[in-house]
Amino acid sequence: MRAGKLDRRLTLLRWTETGRDAFNQPLFEWVDYATVWAQQRPNRGEERFSAQQMVGTAVLTFHIRHRFDVSVKDRVEFDGALYEVTAPPREIGRRVVLEIDCTAVAE
């Protein structure tokens, strides 16, 4: 992968225990664990009719340098928006590129 194509900055987030409350129950939060350079692949989206309303979803695909620690339990922050990883990241080449499919999080 050419470094010149990696022109977007994204942050990988993981659901992590950050402490305990007064009742010793775990407190969880989305925590940044890596900031990487990425290539944004062409967007695709879909609209469907659900519950008497038109519902749309934004789908993005990113290529990053290969990492072993990205999973479907993670989130991606890109351009101020949050995206959930929707499919297991795919390895392209021999541990050269990791392809990540993401869907926008509605919060």
Image: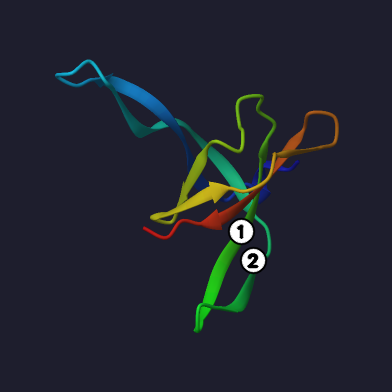
Q: What is the distance, in whole Å, between disc 1 and disc 2 at their CAs? A: 5 Å
* Residue at position x 74%, y 37% in the image: 97
The residue drawn where x is 68% and y is 64% is 42
Give me the residue at 50% from left, 46% from top: 9
Position above or below: 95 against 10:
above
Dot 2 alpha-carbon crowd within 10 angstroms: few under 14, some 14 to 19, many 20 or more: few
Percent position of residue 77, x then y: 45, 47
For disc 1, the marked residue is 60
> Residue placed at 70% from the left, 31% from the top?
66
Numbered-mark total: 2
Which residue, given by chain and number where applicable, does mark 2 sit on?
Answer: 43
- The quadrant in which the N terminus is found is top right
Closer to the chain start, of discs 1 and 2, is: 2
- Circles 1 and 2: CB atoms closer than 8 Å: yes
Amino acid identity at mark 2 = Asn
Q: Please identify the residue farthest to the left as the structure is shown.
A: 22
Helix, strand or loop at label 1? It is: strand
